[in-house]
Image: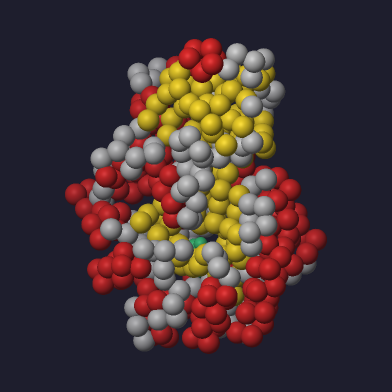
């Protein structure tokens, strides 16, 4: 067993429903086999467990590992393609790079960059948009397993209106998806996600095949895009003859295990449908800003009871850090003025941790530091004299410290990361006594 000493911040109760930031100052977590067995004040826990190995995380504070509910594995090397709206950015920036993953050796390098990018940003769980090429999807599952990252991912499928070298057909999509699921779903921390790219690029027969796979693989998730860009939405409505959410729902693809990214421009009936199905939306604020997609109507999602979590949407998103996404989420709501939802630091932490765990159906396992959860954690400990170090030195309380961290923090401030008690990243040796 290991005793971790530090200041622990988490959001087990939802700030959107009256919950607050939970803080354990000079606290301790007792971890055995990767699971939190006890928590409390350090002095008390140490007295009860005087012999256990001690990991001293004092200075800075410890957060639950981030849960990124929407991030594209093949796009890690094209982050920063600014200045284009969605459909132009896909054609000119994202999809040419995605086509390069036909080469498994190239895909392997991308997978390494991708997994280290996530872990380096304090992300310990992710719903990962895979590749159009099955061997590349094997590669990202293998790299995540090697490092220990908890991912849900799958084969991306499309059969119209994108470059032809990314096309599949319904039979091949079904066959390759089931083969990938049989290799990875439920193996270690991996799970399978059925992944139609977006209904713009998927025929009805292909979405039907996605429904078949979803029903065949118990516990599989469904992820895709929805209502991101006004030009895209008009095209989907013309092609499908219905609204965007219905284009998935009529094939049985919208349910409690569904996460749809963006939803910047939903209608009220679409929000009502998402809520009635128990589906979740991945809010990707830096991508929404970078592509000029729009400002996310969080208050309308809340009013309809639609579940919302956070996604980086790398590579339209501008980096892996959910600290940056939290700040961008806050800014977007400020810009919406009286249409916006005011966000406190506790809301931002909840969106980046607990809400993500719940959206991914992993709420019993991760997302906070409640007894019984896996110890997925990040130690925020900036180097001396860096902007966050200065900011934290002048914070008045834990909420203020968290606000400063969302404002100033970046992956360089994530000193160490644990997944299920295993140290998966460290910038310098932790103090072990
Ligand atoms: N819609 C379809 N594909 C994509 C993608 O790769 N990124 C974003 N942001 N939206 C999409
Ligand atoms: Zn996306």
Look at the picture and state if 47 lies above or below 170.
above
In the displayed structure, does residue 386 sit left or right of residue 309? right
- In the current view of this chain or complex, which residue is farthest to the right? 105
Question: What scheme was used to colour the molecule?
Answer: secondary structure
Look at the picture and state if 156 lies above or below 1.
below
Q: Is residue 91 visible?
A: no
In the displayed structure, does residue 130 sit left or right of residue 311? right
Look at the picture and state if 10 lies above or below 396.
below
Residue 14's x, y, as percent? 33, 43
Picture quadrant where residue 49 is located: top right
Residue 223's x, y, as percent? 50, 66
Residue 149's x, y, as percent? 64, 47
Residue found 37% across the figure and 47% down from its top:
329
- In the current view of this chain or complex, which residue is farthest to the left? 338
- In the current view of this chain or complex, which residue is farthest to the front? 48
Picture quadrant where residue 266 is located: bottom left
Residue found 54% across the figure and 16% down from its top:
48
Picture quadrant where residue 401 is located: top left
Depth order, front residue of 131/63:
63
In the displayed structure, does residue 130 sit left or right of residue 62? right
Residue found 64% across the figure and 27% down from its top:
1
Q: Quadrant of the C terminus?
A: top right
Q: How many marks?
A: 0
Depth order, front residue of 78/411:
411
Q: Is residue 189 visible?
A: yes
């Amino acid at each position: 067993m290991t005793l971790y000493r530090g200041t622990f911040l988490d959001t087990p109760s939802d700030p959107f429903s009256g919950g607050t930031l939970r803080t354990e100052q000079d606290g301790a977590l007792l971890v055995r086999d990767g699971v939190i067995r006890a928590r409390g004040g350090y002095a008390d826990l140490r007295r009860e467990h005087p012999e256990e190995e001690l990991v001293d995380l004092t200075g800075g504070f410890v957060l639950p590992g981030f849960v990124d509910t929407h991030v594209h594995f093949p796009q890690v090397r094209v982050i920063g393609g600014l200045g284009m709206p969605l459909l132009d950015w896909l054609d000119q920036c994202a999809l040419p790079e995605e086509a390069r993953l036909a080469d498994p050796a190239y895909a392997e390098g991308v997978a390494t960059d991708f997994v280290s990018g996530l872990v380096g940003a304090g992300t310990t769980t992710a719903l990962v948009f895979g590749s159009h090429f099955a061997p590349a999807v094997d590669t990202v599952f293998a790299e995540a397993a090697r490092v220990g990252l908890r991912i849900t991912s799958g084969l991306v499928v499309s059969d119209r209106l994108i470059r032809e070298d990314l096309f599949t057909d319904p039979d091949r999509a079904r066959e390759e998806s089931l083969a990938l699921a049989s290799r990875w779903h439920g193996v270690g921390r991996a799970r399978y996600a059925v992944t139609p790219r977006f209904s713009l690029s998927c025929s009805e027969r292909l979405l039907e095949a996605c429904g078949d796979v979803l029903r065949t693989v118990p516990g599989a998730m469904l992820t895709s895009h929805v209502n991101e860009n006004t030009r895209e939405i008009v095209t989907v409505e013309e092609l499908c003859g219905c609204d965007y959410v219905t284009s998935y729902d009529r094939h049985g693809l919208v349910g409690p295990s569904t996460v749809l990214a963006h939803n910047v421009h939903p209608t009220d009936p679409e929000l009502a449908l998402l809520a009635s199905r128990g589906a979740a939306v991945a809010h990707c604020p830096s991508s929404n800003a970078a592509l000029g997609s729009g400002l996310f109507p969080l208050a309308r999602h809340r009013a309809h009871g639609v579940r919302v979590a956070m996604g980086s949407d790398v590579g339209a998103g501008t980096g892996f850090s959910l600290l940056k996404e939290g700040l961008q989420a806050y800014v977007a709501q400020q810009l919406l003025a009286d249409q916006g939802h005011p966000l406190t630091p506790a809301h931002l932490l909840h969106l980046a941790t607990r809400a993500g765990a719940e959206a991914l159906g992993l709420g019993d396992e991760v997302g906070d530091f409640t007894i019984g959860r896996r110890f997925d954690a990040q130690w925020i400990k900036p180097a001396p004299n860096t902007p966050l170090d200065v900011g934290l030195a002048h914070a008045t309380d834990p909420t203020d410290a968290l606000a400063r961290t969302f404002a100033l923090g970046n992956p360089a401030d994530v000193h160490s990361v644990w997944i299920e008690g295993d140290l998966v990243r460290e910038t310098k040796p932790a103090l072990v006594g």
